[in-house]
Image (cartoon, rainbow, N blue to C red):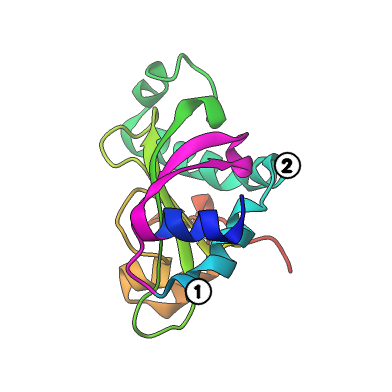
Amino acid sequence: MTDNELLIILEKGGQVSVPYFDGSMIQVEKCDLSLEEVLPAFKRFLSLTAEQRRSDARHLLAYCKMIVYAVGEDALEDMGGSEPGASLIFFDKLEAGKYASKPTIYVQIEGNVDWEPEHGLQMSWAEGDRLVKVSAFDGHPTNAHASAKPEDDQYVFECYKREFCTFPDPV
């Protein structure tokens, strides 16, 4: 897509093919920020590959394991006994935003997952290319923003049971 086509999608909303999710078409929400400010992060997000998704799968697996720990193996019944994968994730929307205390642009995606139908899934990438959060959907772009604890940003997946928490890949 050209920059102009992406700017129109950011301005008005629309669907875009996301290579990170094997080219799945995902709805982009209308962006209220400066489009020129958001475009670089959005383009970086769209340059992520399925190979990067496979590397990031450990964060989703940790989320699934935490749910199984919390509610029991009944959570696996809805999944047909399989581990989480792209075929078990159904994305609803993608949006870009930031919050007041940081100039960082976050590209966030929300969707549904079989292992947690009530709270779903949220993934957030700082500047479009660094996965910083995998969680149940809460609308917050980072773990620290959600908890008001700066130390929670050391994790990609953060939860009450520290053995399930995951760290980002080394830079």
Residue nearer the viewer, 61 or 1: 1
Residue 116 falls in which quadrant of the image?
A: top left
| Left or right placement of residue 66 versus residue 23 in this view | left
Viewer can see residue 60: yes
Q: Earlier in the sequence, mark 1 or mark 2?
A: 1
Q: Is residue 59 above or below residue 96?
A: above
Residue 148 falls in which quadrant of the image?
A: bottom left
Q: Which residues are magenta?
A: 11-33
Q: Residue at x 43, y 83 (%)?
A: 102
| Left or right placement of residue 27 versus residue 4 in this view | left
Look at mark 1 in the image and give the residue it sits on: 36
Q: Position of residue 2 (x, y in %)?
A: 61, 55
Label ID, residue 51: 2
Q: Is residue 83 above or below residue 124?
A: above
Q: Position of residue 142 (x, y in %)?
A: 42, 67
Residue nearer the viewer, 146 or 92: 92
Residue nearer the viewer, 157 or 103: 103
